[in-house]
Amino acid sequence: MKATISVGVIGIIASAALIGCGSGSGNETASEANDTLASVDLALTNSVPAGVQCIKVSVTVAGQTVTPPLVSTSSGQSAVNVSIGQLPAGAATFQAWAYNLACASVTSSTTANWVADPASASLVAGYVSTVALNFRQNNNVAISANFSGNVAAIYTSNYASYARMGDGTVMEWGGTGFWGQWVPTPVASLTNVAEVAGGNSFECARKTDGTVWCWGYNRSGAMGPSIALGNFAMVPTQITGFNGPVSSITAGTSHVCALAIGYLYCWGNNAEGEFGNGNTTNSSTPVTIRSAVGSVSAGANHTCITDSYSGNVLCTGSNTYGQLGNNSTTNSSSFVYTNLSGAIAVDASAYHTCVLGGDNLVRCFGINSWGNLGDGTTTNRLIPTLVSGLANVQQVQTGYSHNCALVQGGTVSCWGAGLYLGTGQTANQLTPATIPGLSGVLAVHTNQGSHTCVELSDRSVKCWGANDSGQIGDGSMAFIARPMQILF
């Protein structure tokens, strides 16, 4: 979202009292002074962004910086004039800031909500020139330092969990891959990892060089052509056939999808049209599906994407409960549109899907037996439906029968099947509930499973929920009702 201030620069006739604003000796005539001075007025030509109440502008020219008084404004206002006064002619640099506070509350240490990148203009006395100040939201960027022994990121699948360590290695625990590793254990021969995606009994990793490697049980060709169907491989094997470095991977029950230079590739099981290429033929090698894909999420037997230009959400594959979001329960082997656009991210689970919109709200569709759509009911929804009472969402993750969202400020809210929410309660939660005692969260993960893990700002990890395959990582198979810290 941008707002633009147009700066008009107009020459004036100066009086003797104004000559001191120029660079002359003070002996110029009024006519001579007019050659070195310019009058500057600013006019906001686009609507003021929502929330903005105050604007600050400064201009630097001929070695001097002038900052006029703060200007009060209001949302939607389209005529805001800022009188800077008279300045020397010459090359000028303009800067501006906007605040979601009344001007009376703005001090020199107040952080701006909006900021304009510096813009240049040549001030010429007697002429009108224009410079546009383009405002952008002044979002803070969090940077975390990771050391080789620290967790860099967490990922989950149905029955397992994974940690990408600061040195690029991967730790894995749970029922897939290692079949019974109840505590975090290194994956052999795997380094320089940037991302992990876990399916049902297999896993894939994207390395920093954009290559993809998979290990585990080769279900329907998800492990690639070098491992025979039904065989198990402990050592990761490379998947090839992309048009460039892979930037994102995601895994369903038995299929995998990846993005490479904006193109979508899928391989493995396609019996229900998971690929979206118009047929139901399995493939052990990546199949090129389509271009202009912004993000992709593989559900158990369906796949959803966002369009990189419009943010439209499209889904393909199994649609038994309306998880494709197109007001139907008919499977589709080609991508069908939901009625959503401007999406930031989509996350597909077994029988439902959730979408994070540009408004930082969440909408879900599909099965709702446990209240996992968060609309206060247990009615299945065939089209995207707003999750009640949830705002300022930064990330959403779908489990098998519950969902969790990371909310601005580092808290987590979950809804759906009560056992798996981390609240210590057993009753299903039909609308989001904040997980008590959990703060400073950087990311949340509960991919298609019945357990959840979170990354905290101190780089520690906490998990809760189902633990029948050791997916919590506490060394037991006991159900964990509240967040528990995992040791590495």
Image (cartoon, rainbow, N blue to C red):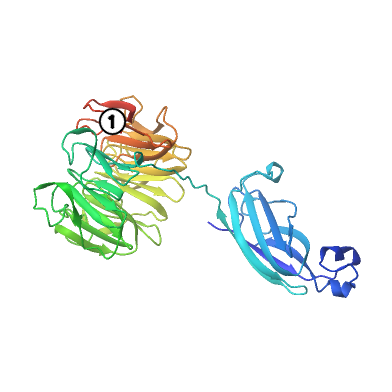
Classify residue 101 as left or right of residue 65. Answer: left
Judge the density around disc 1: few (<14), some (14-19), many (≥20) Cα neighbours within 10 Å.
many
- List x then y, in percent, for residue 29: 90, 73
Classify residue 123 as left or right of residue 423. Answer: right
Q: Nearer the viewer, residue 169 or 76?
A: 169
- List x then y, in percent, for residue 242: 25, 63
Residue that appears at 38% across and 60% down: 308
Report which quarter residue 39 is drawn in: bottom right
Residue 53 visible in the shown view: yes
Residue that appears at 65% across and 64% down: 6
Residue 376 visible in the shown view: no
Report which quarter residue 285 is drawn in: bottom left
Tag count: 1
| Three-letter code for the amino acid on which mark 1 is drawn | Gly
Residue that appears at 75% across and 55% down: 68
- List x then y, in percent, for residue 226: 12, 56
Q: Is residue 154 above or below residue 318?
A: above
Secondary structure, mark 1, is: strand
Classify residue 25 as left or right of residue 442. Answer: right
Q: Which residue is mark 1?
A: 465
Residue that appears at 25% across and 26% down: 479
Q: Nearer the viewer, residue 418 or 153?
A: 153
- List x then y, in percent, for residue 132: 62, 65
Quarter placement of the C terminus: top left
Classify residue 75 as left or right of residue 478. Answer: right
